[in-house]
Amino acid sequence: MPERTLIIIKPDAMQRALAGKIITRFEEKGFQLVAAKVMVASSELAAKHYAVHKDKPFFEGLCKNFSSSAIMVMVWQGNNIIELSRKLMGATFAQDAQPGTIRGDYSCTKGFNLVHGSDSPESAKYEISLYFDEDEIADYNLSNSRWLND
Ligand code: IDP
Ligand code: MG
């Protein structure tokens, strides 16, 4: 089975109407979207999502921003997607991210960096389970698609 990761279009990107551009980056790379929903995260969910940062000074502000308005939560799949999607997103502080990356092209701030992506197979598994049941993930196989063979 191809590798899966959790990608979130964060509140700043949703408010700036950048969802389409961000999704396009993942599609153009060759990854497949297998689950998606728009929601507002509760502060409890934000705290679970960012639990690894619970002792950091920015934790409270991070959870507050994350749960402040709509996000788009997605599962994407593809070869080596966890590492490659982190490269597509760029450095954590958008002001340091290289041009050509999502953060580098669309943000000049530190923490308002538009997207979240899981950073390891373990965090991908945990994060996907926070938002989706297994039966909400559409595990389609492109080689079976009729439009390819019509
Ligand atoms: P990542 O999103 O690139 O994986 P993490 O280190 O996991 O980066 O941090 C989670 C999120 O917390 C970042 O995306 C960013 O929004 C925010 N953040 C990280 N470090 C800082 C900081 O020093 N100040 C403010 N916000 C931060
Ligand atoms: Mg992280």
Image (tube, rainbow, N blue to C red):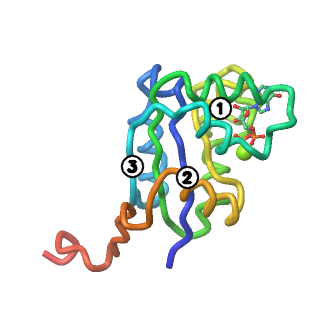
Q: Earlier in the sequence, mark 3 or mark 1?
A: 3
Mark 3 or 1: the one toward you: 3
Relative horizontal placement of residue 30, taking residue 113 as reference (left or right): left
Q: Which residue is mark 2?
A: 130
Helix, strand or loop for disc 3:
strand
Relative horizontal placement of residue 20, taking residue 117 as reference (left or right): left
The residue at 65%/44% (across/down) is 49
Q: Which residue is mark 3?
A: 36
Q: Which quadrant does ligand 2 occupy?
A: top right
Q: Which residue type carries mark 2? A: Leu
Q: Residue 73, image x and y in percent?
A: 47, 44
The residue at 46%/60% (across/down) is 31
Q: Residue 112, image x and y in percent?
A: 65, 24
The quadrant where residue 24 appears? top left
Q: Is residue 20 above or below residue 150?
A: above
Q: Is residue 3 above or below residue 61?
A: below
Q: Which residue is mark 1?
A: 104
